[in-house]
């Protein structure tokens, strides 16, 4: 990456900062994906109903939304380093707590939820802070670095699914508590990295925009719409990928997980790595438009294909099409409002999470109303990339007339 890793102009080396942020996104992937792999285990071991198990994911994402909003007001006062170190401590404590707390409380479900809330707070802080930490580093190709950073969430998701599947195959699922402690090592180790790496201020003290100023800026609302569409386009397919693979190919859940969410995450990661490597040669907004069009085609293929394998191809390739959307939206926002500061990054994270909650819900509800036809629900997702493309075009038009 040329001199990106050393940033010779300041004399500081930022390779450690990048490593810390990479591991931060891997930590977030572990937090989001590990507990859902244990749902059937929680059901059989603790007698927790499916309805209550569904609350685990809801609690995780709702906690992240709350943290996103709080970060917009308080992170600048607390400081980036203290906040991100606290994020890793909370993530490690929550994951390790899964191995002990459910068995020590009268209600195992309450113990699980407490742990989920603890590591969700850490995950929410990581989501808000890692992007501006990298953005503040004096790299040459910031858009590419942002895309590469977000690829580590994809590789983390693949790693936790494959690693957990391998562990359960070798040692048995009854030893899941040991695996929870092993996954907790990642954030606990990363405490040292964030405590010692160089962290630059995103905006000089007193110069960043307040939430009120952002809300009064019309172009900021276009950026919020862009981020909501990015989250919806990505997670509407990602959250239903396993069920879609199972229903399309009539395979077991294990094969469905590997063909669906794993395949989706791999292609999304490849997209982000490729943009990270060659992004300085490409116009980001044009690339976003092309990705939106490809995403639309993937939703149409998955929703209309009569052959199951074609539907699965559309589902998997959708991962490639959405790869740039989330990090690209952040980069476009940072370039459009360079004084947006932490408040902007936190509100963008909130908007992305909101899209990630709304998108899968729309697919699920429309599928149910169509007689549990998942293809019909997926087809309804075409609105997300369409609005995303229209928003990018509106941003380009606004920039030209400004």
Image: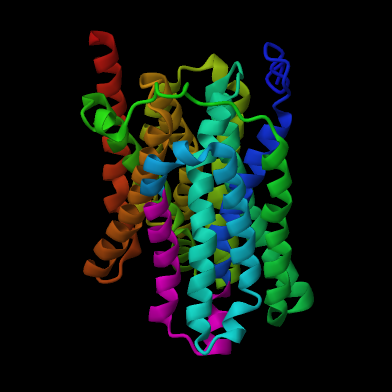
Direction from residue 102 to residue 3 in the image, left or right: right
**Image quadrant for the N terminus?**
top right
The quadrant of the image that shows the C terminus is top left
**Predominant secondary structure in magenta?**
helix
Which residue corresponds to the image point at 39% horizontal and 65% vertical from the top-left? 58
**Residue 225 belongs to magenta span:** no
Quarter of the rendering containing residue 281 = top right
Residue ID at (44%, 66%): 57
Q: Is residue 402 visible?
A: yes
Colour scheme of the picture: rainbow
Is 314 left or right of 355, judged from the image as shown?
Answer: right
Residue 259 visible, this angle = no
| Figure quadrant of residue 346 | top left
x, y (%) of residue 242?
49, 63
The percent coordinates of residue 370 (x first, y second) are 23, 66
Nearest the camera: 295 or 101? 101
**Rendering coords of residue 269 (x, y %):** 58, 41
Residue visible at 37% across and 57% down in the picture: 306
Q: Is residue 1 left or right of residue 399?
A: right
Which quarter of the figure has residue 197? top right
55 is higher (above) or lower (below) than 202: below
In the rendered image, residue 57 lying in the magenta stretch gets the answer yes
Residue 227 shown left or right of residue 190 in the figure? left
Q: Position of residue 173 (x, y in %)?
A: 68, 78
Query: What residue sits 68% from the left and 66% below the top?
Result: 164
* Residue bounds of the magenta highlight: 38-67
Residue at the outermost right position: 170
Q: Answer above or below: position of 313 versus 279.
A: below
Compared to residue 309, the image places residue 253 above or below, namely below
């Amino acid at each position: 990456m040329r001199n990106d890793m050393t940033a010779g102009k300041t004399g500081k080396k930022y390779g450690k900062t990048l490593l810390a942020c990479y591991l931060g996104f891997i930590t977030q992937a572990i937090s989001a994906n590990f507990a859902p792999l244990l749902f059937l285990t929680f059901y059989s071991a603790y007698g927790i109903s499916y309805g209550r198990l569904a609350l685990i994911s809801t609690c995780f994402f709702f906690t992240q939304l709350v943290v996103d909003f709080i970060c917009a007001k308080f992170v600048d006062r607390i400081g980036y380093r203290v906040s991100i170190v606290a994020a890793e401590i909370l993530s490690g404590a929550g994951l390790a707590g899964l191995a002990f707390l459910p068995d020590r409380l009268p209600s195992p479900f309450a113990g699980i939820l407490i742990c989920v809330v603890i590591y969700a707070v850490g995950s929410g802080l990581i989501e808000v802070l890692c992007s501006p930490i990298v953005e503040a580093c004096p790299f040459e190709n910031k858009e590419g670095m942002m895309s590469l950073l977000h690829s580590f969430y994809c590789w983390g998701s693949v790693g936790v699914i494959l690693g957990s599947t391998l562990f359960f195959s070798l040692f048995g699922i009854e030893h899941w508590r040991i695996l929870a402690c092993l996954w907790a090592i990642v954030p606990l180790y990363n405490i040292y990295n964030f405590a010692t790496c160089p962290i630059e201020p995103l905006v000089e003290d007193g110069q960043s925009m307040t939430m009120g100023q952002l809300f009064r800026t019309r172009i900021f609302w276009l950026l919020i719409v862009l981020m909501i569409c990015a989250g919806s386009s990505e997670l509407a397919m990602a959250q239903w990928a396993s069920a879609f693979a199972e229903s399309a190919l009539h395979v077991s859940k294990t094969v469905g997980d590997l063909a669906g969410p794993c395949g989706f995450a791999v292609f999304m990661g490849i997209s982000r790595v490729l943009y990270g490597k060659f992004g300085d040669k490409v116009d980001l907004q044009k690339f976003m438009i092309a990705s939106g069009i490809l995403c639309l085609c993937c939703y149409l293929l998955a929703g209309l294909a009569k052959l199951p394998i074609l539907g699965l191809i559309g589902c998997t390739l959708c991962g490639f099409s959405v790869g740039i959307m989330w990090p690209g939206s952040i980069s476009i926002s940072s370039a459009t409002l360079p004084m947006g500061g932490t408040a902007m990054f936190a509100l963008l994270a909130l908007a992305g999470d909101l899209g990630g909650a709304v998108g899968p819900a729309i697919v699920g509800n429309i599928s149910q109303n169509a007689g549990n036809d998942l293809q019909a629900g997926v087809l309804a997702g075409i609105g997300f990339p369409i609005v995303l493309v229209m928003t990018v075009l509106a941003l380009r038009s606004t920039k030209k007339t400004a």
